[in-house]
Structures are given as C-alpha cells and as structure tokens.
C-alpha cells in the first residue's frame, strides 16, 4: 500500500501545478512538475536536456506511462496473490485517466504523426525510400517502444485475457482506437516503407488479432 501511495503521489506532480515553484510558461511548468515527480520517487534530476516544449511534453508522457505501469503492476500483483486489492479513490481514478490521456496526446499521437509524415515523403520520392535520418529513427523506435509498453499492460504473457485492473479497463474502454492506430501502422508496415533500421514490428500483429477477437466476443455477449 505504501508503494501504491508513493507512486500515485508522484503521478500527482505530473498533472498538477507545484504550488512552490512559479512557472512563467508551460515548458517551465512541466520541468518543475518533472523535478518534483523525480524527487518523490527518490530519483536524480532529469539527465537529458529538454530544450523544447515538445521535449518536456514527451518526457512527461513517458513518465506518465511509467506511473500507469507501476500502478497496474501493483494492482494485478495483489489480485494474483488473492490479497485484498487496494481501493482507488475517485481522485486517484481521475488522475489515472489524465495520465493515460497525456500518454496518447503528448507521446503516441505526436510520434505517429511525425513517423507517418516520413512514410509519406518516402512514397512521394523513390530516392528517399531506403534512407532515414537519425531523428526519423528515434521517433520510430520511441513509437514502437511506447506502443509495446501499452500492449504489455493488456498482454503481459501468452494468456488470452488481459489482467483485470482499472488500467486495462480504461485502456480498452476509452483509448482502444488510439491504441489500434499505431499498432496497425507498425505491425502492418509495408515492405516498401520498412528498412533494417525501422522494420515492420511483427510481434504486434498477433496481439492486435487477440485484442480484436476479445472485442468481438465482448460485442457478441453484449448483444
């Protein structure tokens, strides 16, 4: 319970303004939030330079996903051990929904938009088809990593059914289409757009098929 409380408190800093740190702009505000977030978890200050607002938003979203992963792990661990699952209050639920929205709005969507723009440029110019600059590759691999981390919440093992927690329920009920977009883009990337450094993410396809099967079965039950 103490670990859950600590993680939720850290997540609180990612969504609320620290009262003790004045922020002249959004980037400064996000950096101050990240500083208090890291302090709550006993972690060092941000190692990398966050030079732009996009950098600060992306790092906030990355840490928001980290909070969701830890809360999910704690809740499912209690359930697996048949111990009373900790109760999340209304405020906690609102915070977790906000963190999930941050993950998609500040990380998944921007990365997918930039990667898709690269693919569009490749289809319009054959000379670019087999070339990628370092920024393109960073975006591609960060999108792949974040998407796989979200899928791991639903399918941590070979089991057919996702573990039951507020996190998985929220992901399926509120963000299913948001999740499917990068899954389909990465898992079904045509060979003409793929490369050795940015390959089609084959392991995503069976998880998407399982996910769609679960949704179809839920629809049949509901109807």
Image: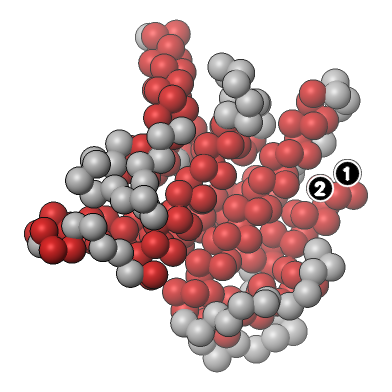
Q: Is residue 36 above or below residue 209?
A: below
Residue 132: where, in percent of width, then height? 30, 64
Q: In the depicted view, which residue is nearer to us: 8 or 67?
A: 67
Q: Which quadrant, please, contains the C terminus?
A: top left
Secondary structure under the numbered disc 2 in the rendered image: helix
Residue 167: where, in percent of width, then height? 61, 38
Q: Which residue corresponds to the image point at 73% horizontal and 68% vertical from the top-left?
A: 37
Q: CA distance from mark 1 to mark 2?
A: 5 Å
Residue identified by numbered label 1: 1
Can residue 148 be seen in the rendering of this structure?
Answer: yes
The quadrant holding residue 20 is bottom right
The quadrant holding residue 184 is top left
Can residue 177 be seen in the rendering of this structure?
Answer: no
Q: Which residue corresponds to the image point at 41% horizontal and 34% vertical from the top-left?
A: 202
Q: Is residue 188 above or below residue 23?
A: above
The label shown at residue 4 is 2
Q: Which residue corresponds to the image point at 78% horizontal and 74% vertical from the top-left?
A: 44
Asked if the residues shown at circle 1 and circle 2 are in contact, with their CB atoms under 8 angstroms apart, the answer is: yes
Residue 197: where, in percent of width, then height? 39, 55
Q: Residues within 10 Å of mark 2 (few under 14, many from 20)?
A: some
The label shown at residue 177 is none
Residue 48: where, in percent of width, then height? 61, 77
């Amino acid at each position: 319970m103490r670990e859950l409380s600590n993680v939720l408190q850290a997540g609180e800093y990612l969504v609320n303004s620290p009262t003790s740190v004045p922020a002249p702009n959004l980037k400064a505000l996000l950096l101050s939030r990240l500083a208090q977030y890291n302090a709550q978890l006993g972690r060092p200050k941000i190692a990398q330079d966050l030079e732009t607002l996009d950098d600060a938003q992306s790092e906030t979203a990355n840490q928001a996903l980290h909070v969701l992963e830890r809360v999910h792990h704690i809740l499912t661990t209690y359930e697996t051990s048949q111990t009373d699952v900790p109760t999340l209050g209304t405020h906690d639920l609102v915070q977790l929904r906000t963190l999930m929205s941050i993950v998609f709005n500040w990380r998944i969507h921007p990365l997918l938009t930039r990667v898709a723009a690269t693919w569009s440029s490749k289809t319009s110019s054959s000379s670019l088809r087999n070339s990628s600059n370092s920024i393109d590759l960073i975006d591609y691999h960060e999108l792949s990593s974040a998407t796989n981390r979200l899928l791991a919440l639903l399918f941590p093992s070979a089991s057919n059914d996702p573990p039951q927690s507020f996190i998985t329920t929220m992901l399926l009920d509120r963000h299913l289409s948001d999740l499917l977009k990068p899954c389909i883009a990465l898992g079904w990337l045509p060979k003409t757009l793929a490369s050795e450094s940015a390959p089609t993410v084959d392991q995503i396809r069976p998880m998407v098929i399982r996910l769609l099967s679960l949704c179809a079965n839920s629809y049949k039950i509901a109807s």
